[in-house]
Amino acid sequence: MPFRPTFAQLFGQDTTIAEVVFALVAATMIVAFATSWYRRRKGMGPARKSKANRIELSYLGALIGMAIFLMIASVSANGKDFPSGDPPAPAVRVQVTGFQWCWKFHYVGEPVTVSGSCQHGAYPTLVLPTGRPVELEVTSTDVIHAFWVPYLREKMFAYPGHVNDFTVTLTSSGRWIGRCAQLCGLYHYEMDFWLQAESPARFGRWLRAHGGSAATLGSGT
């Protein structure tokens, strides 16, 4: 699913709320210190306990309301990314295999596999179509790795003998770096790859040029 827009929306919203709360807390502290200083200078006693209780209850109510709002906003956003019912069938499935110290991408149902050494910048490229659901099946042949594409705000651990999968729909063409986000040995720092998103037509031509058929993409190729 398109996680990036949802993440950006929630991050911006939560950052704004945090900034407002920080400003309010700072302003309240300044007013409280100024009031305390003024009352001491004038020889006045502390504020009445009933008034203090009302202020504390107001703070508590605001805190609870904020927590409820954030929870509802988060659940609502997750509901958009993970709608109820059966998800759409993926147009493309790719088996993503991490190994010390590079990646292998096998397009399920097609005789197409992309890999590399990852050393000295020889990174493999994972080519995917835009606007179509793509299922990535992530695993490892040796130790724990992590498939991470910062642009997508998405990370998935790659465990040996186990498959983690997720579905993503890329909304625009582009080329972004991907990395292994789990320390996995001597050449972990070189274990990068490229994610390249192309229109269905260009992706279909790329797949056919590498021996595939791209039949699952339909007439758009």
Image (cartoon, grey):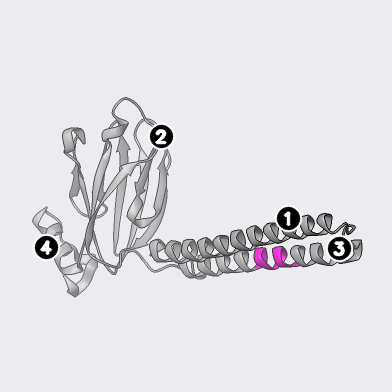
Q: Is residue 115 left or right of residue 16?
A: left
Q: Is residue 215 left or right of residue 208?
A: right
Q: Give the CA separation, mark 4 to mark 1.
A: 69 Å
Q: Which residues are magenta?
A: 61-68
Residue picked out by circle 3: 53
Q: Can you tell which of label 4 and label 2 is closer to the viewer?
A: 2
What mark, if any, has residue 144 been given in the picture?
2
Q: Residues within 10 Å of mark 4 (few under 14, many from 20)?
A: some
Q: Secondary structure at mark 4?
A: helix
Mark before the other along the chain sequence, 4 or 3: 3
Q: Residue flagged by tag 4: what amino acid is it?
A: Arg
Q: Residues within 10 Å of mark 1 (few under 14, many from 20)?
A: few
Q: Residue placed farthest to the front in the image? A: 42
Front residue of 186/87: it is: 186
Q: Residue flagged by tag 2: what amino acid is it?
A: Ile
Q: Position of residue 138 (x, y in %)?
A: 37, 46
Q: Give the CA separation, mark 4 to mark 2.
A: 34 Å
Q: Position of residue 55 (x, y in %)?
A: 80, 65
Mark before the other along the chain sequence, 1 or 3: 1
Mark before the other along the chain sequence, 3 or 2: 3
| Visible residue check, residue 1 | no
Q: Give the CA separation, mark 1 to mark 2.
A: 53 Å
What mark, if any, has residue 33 been given in the picture?
1
Mark before the other along the chain sequence, 1 or 2: 1
Residue 164 drawn above or below residue 65: above
Front residue of 200/78: it is: 78
Q: Can you tell which of label 3 and label 2 is closer to the viewer?
A: 3
Residue 179 counted in the magenta span: no
Residue picked out by circle 4: 205
Q: Secondary structure at mark 1?
A: helix
